[in-house]
Protein backbone atom coordinates (compact mmCIF):
# COMPACT_ATOMS: atom_id res chain seq x y z
CA UNK A 1 0.00 0.00 0.00
CA UNK A 2 1.07 3.57 -0.57
CA UNK A 3 2.42 5.48 2.36
CA UNK A 4 3.27 9.16 2.59
CA UNK A 5 5.62 10.20 -0.16
CA UNK A 6 7.78 13.29 -0.41
CA UNK A 7 9.79 14.80 -3.20
CA UNK A 8 12.52 15.58 -3.79
CA UNK A 9 14.30 13.35 -1.28
CA UNK A 10 17.38 15.58 -1.39
CA UNK A 11 17.67 19.22 -2.34
CA UNK A 12 20.74 21.42 -2.46
CA UNK A 13 20.01 25.12 -2.78
CA UNK A 14 22.27 28.12 -2.94
CA UNK A 15 21.61 30.73 -0.31
CA UNK A 16 18.89 33.06 -1.53
CA UNK A 17 17.17 30.55 -3.80
CA UNK A 18 13.54 29.56 -3.42
CA UNK A 19 12.63 25.89 -2.91
CA UNK A 20 9.37 23.92 -3.04
CA UNK A 21 8.94 20.63 -1.20
CA UNK A 22 6.05 18.32 -2.04
CA UNK A 23 4.09 15.91 0.14
CA UNK A 24 1.60 13.27 -1.02
CA UNK A 25 -0.33 12.04 2.04
CA UNK A 26 -2.05 8.71 2.46
CA UNK A 27 -5.31 8.73 0.54
CA UNK A 28 -8.23 9.67 2.78
CA UNK A 29 -6.12 11.22 5.50
CA UNK A 30 -7.71 14.49 6.50
CA UNK A 31 -4.84 15.87 8.56
CA UNK A 32 -1.44 16.84 7.20
CA UNK A 33 1.52 18.12 9.17
CA UNK A 34 4.90 19.58 8.30
CA UNK A 35 7.84 19.25 10.69
CA UNK A 36 11.44 20.40 10.55
CA UNK A 37 14.08 18.07 12.00
CA UNK A 38 17.61 19.26 12.62
CA UNK A 39 20.38 16.70 13.12
CA UNK A 40 20.21 15.08 16.53
CA UNK A 41 16.90 16.70 17.44
CA UNK A 42 13.27 15.72 17.39
CA UNK A 43 10.81 16.95 14.78
CA UNK A 44 9.71 20.57 15.34
CA UNK A 45 6.17 21.43 14.30
CA UNK A 46 5.78 23.87 11.43
CA UNK A 47 2.16 23.81 10.29
CA UNK A 48 -1.03 21.74 10.18
CA UNK A 49 -3.87 21.33 7.68
CA UNK A 50 -7.24 19.75 8.05
CA UNK A 51 -8.38 19.15 4.48
CA UNK A 52 -7.49 22.39 2.66
CA UNK A 53 -7.72 24.59 5.73
CA UNK A 54 -4.48 25.61 7.40
CA UNK A 55 -5.52 25.46 11.05
CA UNK A 56 -2.18 26.12 12.70
CA UNK A 57 0.91 27.79 11.28
CA UNK A 58 2.41 28.82 14.59
CA UNK A 59 5.61 26.86 13.98
CA UNK A 60 6.63 28.53 10.72
CA UNK A 61 9.91 30.27 11.66
CA UNK A 62 9.52 33.30 9.42
CA UNK A 63 7.43 34.78 6.65
CA UNK A 64 9.84 33.15 4.19
CA UNK A 65 8.03 29.87 4.89
CA UNK A 66 4.70 29.23 3.24
CA UNK A 67 2.60 26.07 2.97
CA UNK A 68 -0.50 25.22 1.01
CA UNK A 69 -2.85 22.32 0.39
CA UNK A 70 -5.30 23.74 -2.13
CA UNK A 71 -7.39 20.63 -2.82
CA UNK A 72 -7.05 18.96 0.54
CA UNK A 73 -4.63 16.33 -0.69
CA UNK A 74 -1.11 17.15 -1.92
CA UNK A 75 0.72 19.83 0.04
CA UNK A 76 3.67 22.05 -0.83
CA UNK A 77 6.03 23.73 1.60
CA UNK A 78 7.79 26.68 0.01
CA UNK A 79 10.81 28.42 1.43
CA UNK A 80 11.80 31.73 -0.11
CA UNK A 81 15.29 33.23 -0.06
CA UNK A 82 16.76 30.19 1.68
CA UNK A 83 19.29 30.71 4.46
CA UNK A 84 21.88 28.31 5.85
CA UNK A 85 19.86 27.85 9.02
CA UNK A 86 17.07 26.36 6.88
CA UNK A 87 19.23 23.28 6.30
CA UNK A 88 17.34 20.37 7.88
CA UNK A 89 15.15 17.40 7.07
CA UNK A 90 11.57 18.42 6.35
CA UNK A 91 9.10 15.73 7.35
CA UNK A 92 5.51 15.49 6.24
CA UNK A 93 2.99 13.39 8.17
CA UNK A 94 -0.65 12.56 7.63
CA UNK A 95 -3.34 11.09 9.83
CA UNK A 96 -7.02 10.52 10.27
CA UNK A 97 -8.75 12.89 12.69
CA UNK A 98 -9.51 11.78 16.20
CA UNK A 99 -8.09 11.07 19.61
CA UNK A 100 -5.06 8.84 19.69
CA UNK A 101 -4.61 8.52 15.98
CA UNK A 102 -1.01 8.04 14.95
CA UNK A 103 0.77 10.16 12.42
CA UNK A 104 2.27 8.43 9.40
CA UNK A 105 5.50 10.07 8.35
CA UNK A 106 7.02 10.38 4.92
CA UNK A 107 10.72 9.75 4.30
CA UNK A 108 11.51 13.47 4.43
CA UNK A 109 13.32 15.92 2.20
CA UNK A 110 16.87 16.69 3.24
CA UNK A 111 17.52 20.34 2.38
CA UNK A 112 21.07 21.64 2.32
CA UNK A 113 21.60 25.34 1.80
CA UNK A 114 25.11 26.26 0.69
CA UNK B 1 5.02 26.79 28.28
CA UNK B 2 5.60 23.33 26.93
CA UNK B 3 8.65 21.21 27.58
CA UNK B 4 9.59 17.59 27.09
CA UNK B 5 12.75 15.81 28.25
CA UNK B 6 14.29 12.42 27.64
CA UNK B 7 17.84 11.09 28.00
CA UNK B 8 20.10 11.66 25.02
CA UNK B 9 21.69 8.21 24.85
CA UNK B 10 21.33 4.74 26.34
CA UNK B 11 23.19 1.48 25.81
CA UNK B 12 21.90 -2.02 26.53
CA UNK B 13 22.77 -5.62 25.78
CA UNK B 14 20.98 -7.89 23.34
CA UNK B 15 18.32 -9.91 25.14
CA UNK B 16 18.07 -7.48 28.05
CA UNK B 17 15.31 -5.04 29.09
CA UNK B 18 15.65 -1.27 28.83
CA UNK B 19 13.42 1.55 30.07
CA UNK B 20 13.46 4.95 28.36
CA UNK B 21 11.97 7.75 30.45
CA UNK B 22 10.21 10.90 29.31
CA UNK B 23 9.00 13.84 31.36
CA UNK B 24 6.83 16.64 30.05
CA UNK B 25 5.14 19.86 31.10
CA UNK B 26 2.11 21.18 29.29
CA UNK B 27 -1.01 23.13 30.12
CA UNK B 28 -3.20 20.89 27.99
CA UNK B 29 -2.84 17.16 27.42
CA UNK B 30 -4.46 14.78 24.95
CA UNK B 31 -2.15 11.83 24.71
CA UNK B 32 1.45 10.68 24.79
CA UNK B 33 3.04 8.94 21.81
CA UNK B 34 6.25 7.01 21.33
CA UNK B 35 7.87 6.73 17.90
CA UNK B 36 10.92 4.80 16.70
CA UNK B 37 13.28 6.41 14.21
CA UNK B 38 16.15 4.57 12.56
CA UNK B 39 18.97 6.73 11.29
CA UNK B 40 18.03 8.43 8.04
CA UNK B 41 14.46 7.15 8.14
CA UNK B 42 11.03 8.50 9.07
CA UNK B 43 9.60 8.06 12.58
CA UNK B 44 7.23 5.10 12.95
CA UNK B 45 4.50 4.80 15.57
CA UNK B 46 5.05 2.52 18.57
CA UNK B 47 2.47 3.36 21.21
CA UNK B 48 -0.15 5.76 22.53
CA UNK B 49 -1.26 6.47 26.12
CA UNK B 50 -3.98 8.85 27.20
CA UNK B 51 -5.00 7.29 30.53
CA UNK B 52 -2.70 6.43 33.41
CA UNK B 53 -1.23 2.98 33.37
CA UNK B 54 0.63 0.47 31.26
CA UNK B 55 -0.13 -0.40 27.64
CA UNK B 56 1.54 -3.59 26.42
CA UNK B 57 2.14 -4.44 22.80
CA UNK B 58 4.41 -7.41 22.22
CA UNK B 59 7.98 -6.67 23.29
CA UNK B 60 7.15 -3.00 23.80
CA UNK B 61 5.18 -1.46 26.67
CA UNK B 62 4.46 2.16 27.50
CA UNK B 63 3.47 3.69 30.82
CA UNK B 64 1.88 7.03 31.62
CA UNK B 65 1.36 9.03 34.82
CA UNK B 66 -0.51 12.23 33.97
CA UNK B 67 -0.20 13.68 37.48
CA UNK B 68 3.57 13.33 37.35
CA UNK B 69 3.97 14.31 33.71
CA UNK B 70 5.92 11.11 33.19
CA UNK B 71 6.02 8.28 30.70
CA UNK B 72 8.36 5.45 29.93
CA UNK B 73 8.87 3.02 27.09
CA UNK B 74 9.93 -0.49 28.09
CA UNK B 75 11.64 -2.69 25.54
CA UNK B 76 12.05 -6.37 26.38
CA UNK B 77 14.19 -9.10 24.78
CA UNK B 78 16.27 -6.49 23.02
CA UNK B 79 17.39 -7.23 19.48
CA UNK B 80 20.13 -5.57 17.47
CA UNK B 81 17.49 -4.07 15.17
CA UNK B 82 16.11 -2.11 18.15
CA UNK B 83 19.11 0.22 17.89
CA UNK B 84 17.40 3.48 16.94
CA UNK B 85 16.24 6.81 18.30
CA UNK B 86 13.07 6.72 20.41
CA UNK B 87 10.95 9.86 20.34
CA UNK B 88 8.47 10.83 23.01
CA UNK B 89 5.71 13.26 21.96
CA UNK B 90 2.57 14.73 23.47
CA UNK B 91 -0.51 16.23 21.91
CA UNK B 92 -2.62 18.95 23.50
CA UNK B 93 -5.81 18.45 21.48
CA UNK B 94 -7.29 15.42 19.73
CA UNK B 95 -6.13 16.85 16.45
CA UNK B 96 -3.27 19.12 15.60
CA UNK B 97 0.39 19.14 16.31
CA UNK B 98 2.50 16.86 18.43
CA UNK B 99 5.38 18.27 20.48
CA UNK B 100 8.40 15.97 20.27
CA UNK B 101 11.37 15.43 22.54
CA UNK B 102 14.84 15.29 21.01
CA UNK B 103 14.88 11.51 21.14
CA UNK B 104 16.88 8.89 23.01
CA UNK B 105 19.47 7.09 20.92
CA UNK B 106 19.51 3.45 22.01
CA UNK B 107 22.48 1.29 21.11
CA UNK B 108 22.03 -2.46 21.53
CA UNK B 109 25.31 -4.36 21.88
CA UNK B 110 25.87 -8.08 21.42
Image (cartoon, helix red, strand yellow):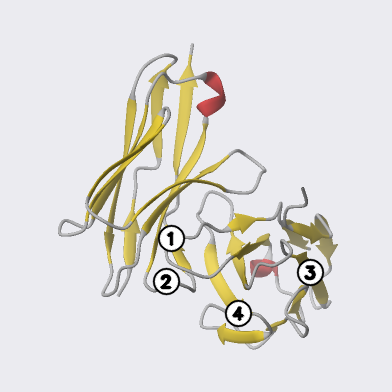
Query: Is B30 on the left or on the right of A50, as rendered?
Result: left
Find the distance from the CA under tag 1 to the CA under tag 2: 7 Å
Say which mark, if any, is on residue B94. 2
Vertical position of residue A69 compared to residue B55: above or below: below
Whether the residues at callouts 1 and 2 have beta carbons within 8 Å, the answer is yes
The residue located at (77%, 48%) in the rendering is: A1
Q: Chain of mark 3?
A: A
Using a 10 Å C-alpha cutoff, classify the residue at mark 4 as few (fewer than 14 neighbours), some (14 to 19) or many (20 or more).
many
Vertical position of residue A31 compared to residue B55: above or below: below
Residue matched to label 3: A21
> Considering only order in the chain, which callout, 3 or 1, is on the residue closer to the N terminus?
3
Q: Secondary structure at mark 2?
A: loop
Question: Where in the figure is residue B28, as x and y percent of width and height?
Answer: 29, 74
Question: Where in the figure is residue A98, as x and y percent of width and height?
Answer: 47, 69
Look at discs 3 and 2 and give the one toward the viewer.
Answer: 2
> Considering only order in the chain, which callout, 3 or 4, is on the residue closer to the N terminus?
3
Q: Chain of mark 4?
A: A
Find the distance from the CA under tag 4 to the CA under tag 3: 19 Å
Look at discs 4 and 3 and give the one toward the viewer.
Answer: 4
Amino acid sequence: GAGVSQSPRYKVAKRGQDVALRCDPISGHVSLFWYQQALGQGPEFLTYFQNEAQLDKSGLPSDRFFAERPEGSVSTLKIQRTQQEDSAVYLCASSLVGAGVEQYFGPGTRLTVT
Amino acid sequence: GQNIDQPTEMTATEGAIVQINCTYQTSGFNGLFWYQQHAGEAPTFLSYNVLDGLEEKGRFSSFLSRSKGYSYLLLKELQMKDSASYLCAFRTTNAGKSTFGDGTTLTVKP
